[in-house]
Amino acid sequence: MRFDGLLVAMCAGAVGIALWRGGRYLADGGGRRRIRARARVVRVWDPPKEGARRSSGIPAEITFVAPDSGREMVLSAEDRGLDAAWPGRAIEVRYPAGRPERFRVTSGPRRLDRDLGASATATSLLLLVLVGHFTDNDGFHKELIGFGVLWMAVSAVVLAFRLAEIVRRRVLLASRAPATGRIVAVLTSRYGPEESPKSAVLFTPVVTFTTHEGHQVTAVCPVGSSSRYYWAGREVSLHYARTDPSVFALDLLGDRLLVAGGLLLLVFFFAFGAALTVAGLLLTGGA
């Protein structure tokens, strides 16, 4: 009984903190201690080095006026999540109050904030622990229902955000323009131990191209692959959105197939949770 009380207190405290951080994010556009500002790319430096991490982004220099101090900042955007850059591009940054040098580039309201994502993940895991612990003596069917509902909820949230981003991308690419680009680097993301042969590796090319308006764009491709299809120096044909060149596709058909595959996987996850919930309800009815 003492253990149950301690578990409830720990879980309630962790869930409370997670919900507080998530609520602070939603109520204040990223949190009361986070400041948003409109920035502009001043110049783009040399492309990322071959084999650099996917999270490195595009090295560039940006400028913005910090709303909390009124100071004009000129800072490096290297390793700050900048996915595409050209001189004059308008972007949004977010930083802790009073610390503009610790900014991060954001891609708009559709991108889940790290704090919000961490809060949702922590809450889901803690609720799963509670469901599993307090239904252990009441029958396996209740565990199935609890886990299934939780799985469906998380899958539905991820699916909703993914669908919103896909719709946005499709709308922008509806007015696309062709261009010839050149691969300038291939970024590498490794998932697992560095020396392990079982580690998953994702290769993501970085491309440069010139728009019809004369903008020299350097951008990280939105999707990567486990096989290396591109090398630095290779010329490629692509299509970009006329109103936002940061949205582009090297292969329209391949891009659509990857999008469809990702959606099908998310739908499968949601269906898996639904199946667990139905199984639990059927077991409850037969008990």
Image (tube, rainbow, N blue to C red):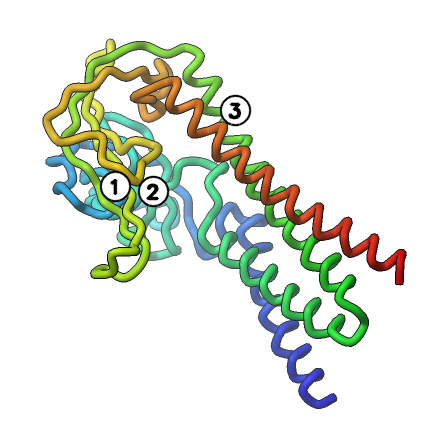
Between 5 and 134, the residue placed more toward the observer is 134
Residue beneath the point at 42% across and 29% down = 258
State which tag comes first along the sequence, 2 or 3: 2
Q: Which residue is mark 2?
A: 105
Q: Position of residue 5 (x, y in %)?
A: 70, 84
The residue sitting at 17% across, 27% down in the picture is 183
The residue labelled by disc 1 is 57
Give how far across and how far down residue 4 sits, in percent. Answer: 70, 83
Amino acid on which the number 2 mark rests in the picture: Val
Q: Secondary structure at mark 2?
A: strand
> Distance from label 2 to label 3 (Cα)?
22 Å
For the C terminus, give its image quadrant.
bottom right
> Do the CB atoms of the residues marked 2 and 1 lie less than 8 Å apart?
yes
Image location of residue 220, percent across then percent down:
27, 33
How many residues crowd around disc 3 within 10 Å: few (fewer than 14), some, or many (20 or more)?
few
Mark 1, secondary structure of its residue? loop
In the image, is residue 3 above or below residue 143? Answer: below
Residue 286: name its quadrant. Answer: bottom right
Q: Which residue is mark 3?
A: 167
Q: CA distance from mark 3 to mark 1?
A: 24 Å
Q: Between residue 248 and residue 269, name the one nearer to us.
A: 269
Q: First in sequence, mark 2 or 1: give its number.
A: 1
For the N terminus, which image quadrant? bottom right
